[in-house]
Image (cartoon, rainbow, N blue to C red):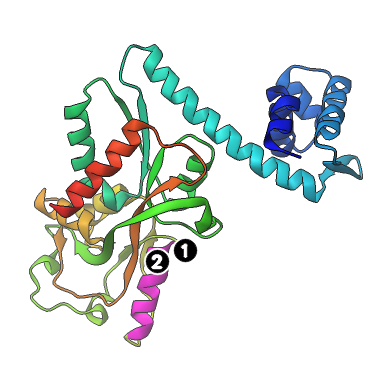
């Protein structure tokens, strides 16, 4: 079966049905979402199976269970949906008379440095380009990239995502810094230690975040137990607010900590941690065309890195 054969026989409505069926779990729910009757959806599914010459689902109780062929087809249809989302975003920008749309996902540590420099440079070149920035953890960003909601990601290839699905370029390593609020009595200590800081309350990322795992490794390497007096939050903004409201200790990516210290929001303690997060990367989908704006953005990221 060739690609040409598939293009001649497949319809987008069938693709939409299969994606809805995968997401909702039942043919009735999928049909309802697409505004069709269940018998019509059943007939469409049968036509799709006839076009592909393979059964895609088998009965499992009152529901349907994908066959190996069905699982493979849905995975490829998800990629097709991502490409269509990217195309729709490009057409949206062009239809508004502007320079298109660029959607970038980034982990928090990259925001104050490379990302800001590259976005500022890109906007100087293309003032009508609409830039959307989503800040999240790498796993969520890669999900959005796969779905076509993002053009590229500045982050890491997280567990559960195959490296072979992406092209990536290392941008920067990410050491960690121990920080306190500016009014904290610890802010002026010349030689603080992890052991000495154990008596203080801490703000930590929750398990199983990479930063939390690395910090636990650091404590184990130094023969120490983890702090027991702690607050857990994944929000780095909340972390900064907390250490300024209470005499608490936290750990932030070094680039983010340095930027906040320069803004007078916190104090980076002169305490060297041996553990560092995996370098973050510029990540793009391997099987999806990269638009001109995204390509130029990658070039500007490289220029900011080299500066």
Report the front residue among 113 and 298.
Answer: 298
Do labels 1 and 2 touch, CB within 8 Å? yes
Q: Horizontal and vertical percent for residue 115? A: 25, 44
Please name the residue that numbered disc 1 is placed on.
207
Q: Quadrant of residue 14?
A: top right
Q: Which residue position holds label 2? A: 212
Residue 149 versus residue 173 in the image, above or below: above
Q: Element under label 1?
A: loop
* Residue 285 seen anywhere in this rendered image of the structure: yes
Q: Residue at x 83, y 18 (%)?
A: 37
Number of numbered labels in the structure image = 2
- Sort mark 1 into few (<14), some (14-19) or many (20+) by Cα contacts within 10 Å: few
Residue 17 left/right relative to 303: right
Q: Which residues are magenta?
A: 208-221
Residue 78 position, x and y percent, is 62, 38
> Does residue 209 belong to the magenta stretch?
yes
């Amino acid at each position: 079966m060739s690609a040409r054969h598939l293009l001649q026989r497949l319809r987008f409505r069938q693709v939409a049905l299969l994606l809805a069926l995968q997401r909702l779990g039942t043919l009735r729910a999928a049909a309802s979402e697409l505004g069709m009757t269940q018998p019509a959806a059943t007939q469409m599914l049968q036509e799709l199976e006839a076009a592909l010459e393979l059964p895609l689902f088998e009965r499992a109780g009152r529901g349907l269970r994908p066959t190996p062929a069905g699982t493979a087809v849905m995975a490829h249809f998800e990629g097709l949906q991502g490409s269509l989302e990217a195309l729709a975003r490009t057409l949206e920008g062009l239809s508004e008379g502007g320079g298109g749309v660029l959607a970038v996902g980034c982990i928090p540590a990259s925001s104050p440095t490379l990302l800001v420099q590259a976005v500022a440079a890109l906007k100087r070149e293309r003032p009508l380009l609409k830039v959307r920035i989503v800040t999240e953890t790498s796993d969520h960003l890669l999900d959005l990239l796969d779905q076509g909601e993002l053009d590229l990601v500045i982050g890491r290839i997280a567990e559960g995502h195959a490296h072979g699905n992406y092209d990536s370029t290392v941008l920067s390593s990410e050491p960690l810094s121990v920080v306190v609020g500016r009014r904290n009595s610890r802010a002026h200590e010349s030689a603080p230690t992890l052991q000495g800081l154990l008596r203080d309350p801490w703000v930590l990322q929750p398990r199983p975040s990479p930063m939390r795992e690395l910090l636990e490794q650091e404590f184990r390497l130094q023969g120490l137990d983890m702090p027991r007096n702690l607050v857990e939050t994944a929000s780095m903004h909340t972390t900064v607010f907390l250490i300024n409201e209470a005499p608490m200790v936290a750990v932030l990516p070094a680039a983010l900590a340095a930027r906040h210290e320069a803004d007078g929001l916190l104090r980076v303690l002169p305490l060297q941690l041996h553990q560092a997060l995996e370098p973050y990367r510029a990540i793009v989908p391997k099987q999806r065309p990269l638009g001109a704006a995204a390509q130029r953005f990658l070039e500007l990221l490289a220029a900011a890195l080299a500066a």
